[in-house]
Image (cartoon, grey):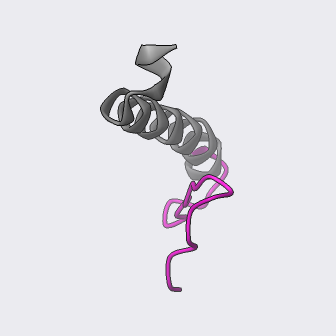
Amino acid sequence: MQQAANPVLLNLARAAAKDAVRQNLSAPLQVSGHPQATVVVRFADEIAPPQ
């Protein structure tokens, strides 16, 4: 429980999850002919980046 509440570990886990999702979605897009496609991953509680 203490480790789960640790903000440093939580941020590391969130960053790793975002990277994994980004990579899993980017690769098929690039292979299917969309090399310039950008995948932006965020959690529901995060503010959307400006477009």
Residue at point 50% right, 59% down?
Answer: 35
Residue 7 location (% of width, % of height): 37, 36
Residue at point 58% right, 56% down?
Answer: 42
Which range of residues does the magenta coloring cover? Answer: 31-51
Q: Is residue 15 above or below residue 42?
A: above
Residue 30 location (% of width, % of height): 56, 50
- The quadrant where residue 45 appears: bottom right
Q: Is residue 7 above or below residue 51?
A: above
Task: Tell me how many marks there are.
Answer: 0
Question: 46 left or right of 2?
Answer: right
Q: Is residue 20 magenta?
A: no
Q: Is residue 46 magenta?
A: yes
Residue at point 43% right, 16% down?
Answer: 2
Q: Is residue 43 above or below residue 1?
A: below
Residue 20 location (% of width, % of height): 52, 32
Q: Nearer the viewer, residue 9 or 38?
A: 9
Dominant secondary structure, magenta: loop
